Amino acid sequence: MAGRHLGAFSRTLPAKMAVGPFARLIAQAIIPVVAVLARAIPAAYGQALNNAKKAGVDASEAAAPVFGKTISRSEALMVLNLTEDEVKADPKAVQKQFEKYFEANDVSKGGSFYLQSKIYRANELLQEFQAEKQKEASSTTAGDKKQ
């Protein structure tokens, strides 16, 4: 077998492939792309925030986490089909709308899990808002009684 000739094919392929040069070429291509993206993405996000501020969007709403679970209060009101006045006037309105829409989008009845999630988050945010307002009201009345 030692003297066996494998043909022309065995002479054209090197015994071992050099991986080092290929890895270096890939790294040289990827590193500049990552560097450009690392500068471009924050700049684009900052520009989007500036545009939102110019358009009159509340800065706290515009700066909400990109992949977070929170939604803006205006979006929560739209999801539950409520107005600011209704939320302030009737604390039970939020719970009533939540139950209505959450039940209507029940997954076991063919509803949408995504919509149910949005409804849940909207209810959660508006309940927190109502609790804060109630706390502020009770602290101001307690402050008035002391004076």
Image (cartoon, helix red, strand yellow):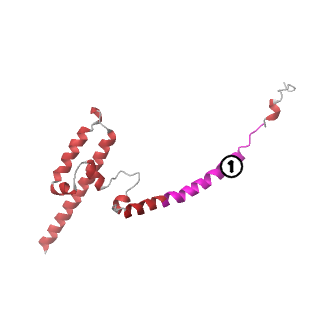
The magenta span reads 15-43
Instruction: Please state if 94 lies on the left or on the right of 8 as rendered.
Output: left
Q: Would you call the spot at circle 1 few (<14 residues within 10 Å), some (14-19), or many (20 or more)? A: few
**Camera-side residue of 83 and 16:** 83
| Residue type, mark 1 in image | Leu
Which residue is denoted by mark 1 in the rendering? 25
In the rendered structure, does residue 142 fall within the stretch colored magenta?
no
Residue 16, given in percent of the width and then of the height, sits at: 76, 38
Determine which quarter of the picture holds residue 63: bottom left
Residue 79, given in percent of the width and then of the height, sits at: 27, 48
Quarter of the figure with the N terminus: top right
Residue 137, given in percent of the width and then of the height, sits at: 17, 64
Residue visible at 43% across and 59% down in the picture: 48
**Camera-side residue of 57 and 129:** 57
Residue 124 visible in the snapshot: no
Residue visible at 41% across and 53% down in the picture: 66
Instruction: Please state if 40 lies on the left or on the right of 21 as rendered.
Output: left
Residue visible at 28% across and 46% down in the picture: 120
Q: Given the current orientation, which residue lies at the most extreme left position?
A: 145
Quarter of the figure with the C terminus: bottom left
Residue 102, given in percent of the width and then of the height, sits at: 25, 41
